[in-house]
Amino acid sequence: MEQITPENMDETSITLVSKVNIPATYCPKCKLLLPEGAGEKQCISCGAKVIVKLPSLENEWEKERVACPKCSKVLIAGVNKRPCKLKCSSCNQKFTLTKKIMKIEICCPKCERKLRIKRSPGEKIIKCPACEMDVKIKC
Ligand SMILES: [Zn+2]
Ligand SMILES: [Zn+2]
Ligand SMILES: [Zn+2]
């Protein structure tokens, strides 16, 4: 019988999630949420092209401390983007560090239950799990 030990697990399957918050950026024209991250972004509401610069986010990503999933040694990421692949300097464990998923909280207009959804631009409709009302959200 084959024994499955952590050593013969696929080394790329270990994923940690970054703890750095990604700031929300808004379109200067229509004030709605832009697609996440830095670089040239196109507003999905009005089509404006916006150059987003997030030097502090890149700085925080670069100096983020993360504990090795195998030996718990605290490492400094040293990479200013996410996702990135890292290797522990002490036990050589490889793992992937992905960006944090940013959530927003809204209240159902009918039953006032708090709903947490992934922050992303554009209009969407979600069903409230409590009262089954379709709630329209525009970020
Ligand atoms: Zn816009
Ligand atoms: Zn390690
Ligand atoms: Zn509801």
Image: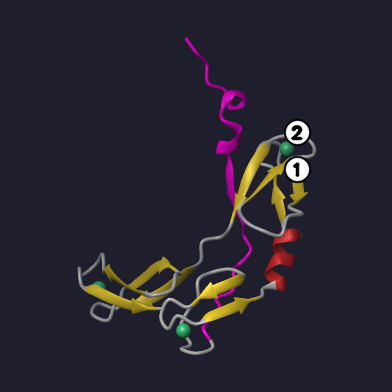
Q: Quadrant of ligand 2?
A: top right
**Disc 2 element:** loop
Q: Quadrant of residue 123?
A: bottom left
Side (left or right) of 19 relative to 113: right
Magenta span has 17? yes
Give the farthest residue toward the right: 90
Give the labeled residue for mark 1.
73
How many neighbours does mark 2 have within 10 angstroms: few (below 14), some (14-19), or many (20 or more)?
few
The quadrant in which the C terminus is found is bottom left
Segment colored magenta = 1-27
Magenta span has 50? no
| Pointer 1 with pointer 2, Cβ within 8 A | yes
Q: Is mark 1 within 8 Å of ligand 2?
A: yes
Q: Is mark 2 within 8 Å of ligand 2?
A: yes
Residue drawn at x 70%, y 51% as measured from the top left: 66
Image coords of residue 6 (percent x, y):
59, 27
Q: Quadrant of residue 135?
A: bottom left
Residue drawn at x 36%, y 70% as measured from the top left: 115
How many neighbours does mark 1 have within 10 angstroms: few (below 14), some (14-19), or many (20 or more)?
some
Task: Name the amino acid type tagged 2.
Answer: Cys
User: In terms of depth relative to the viewer, which is nearer, 120 or 76?
Assistant: 120
Image coords of residue 122 (percent x, y):
39, 75
Task: Name the amino acid type tagged 1.
Answer: Lys
Residue drawn at x 59%, y 48% as measured from the top left: 16
Residue drawn at x 58%, y 68% as measured from the top left: 37
Side (left or right) of 131 relative to 86: left
- Residue 23 is tagged as none
Image coords of residue 59 (percent x, y):
74, 66
- Residue 91 is tagged as 2
User: In the image, which is nearer the foreground, mark 1 or mark 2?
Assistant: 2
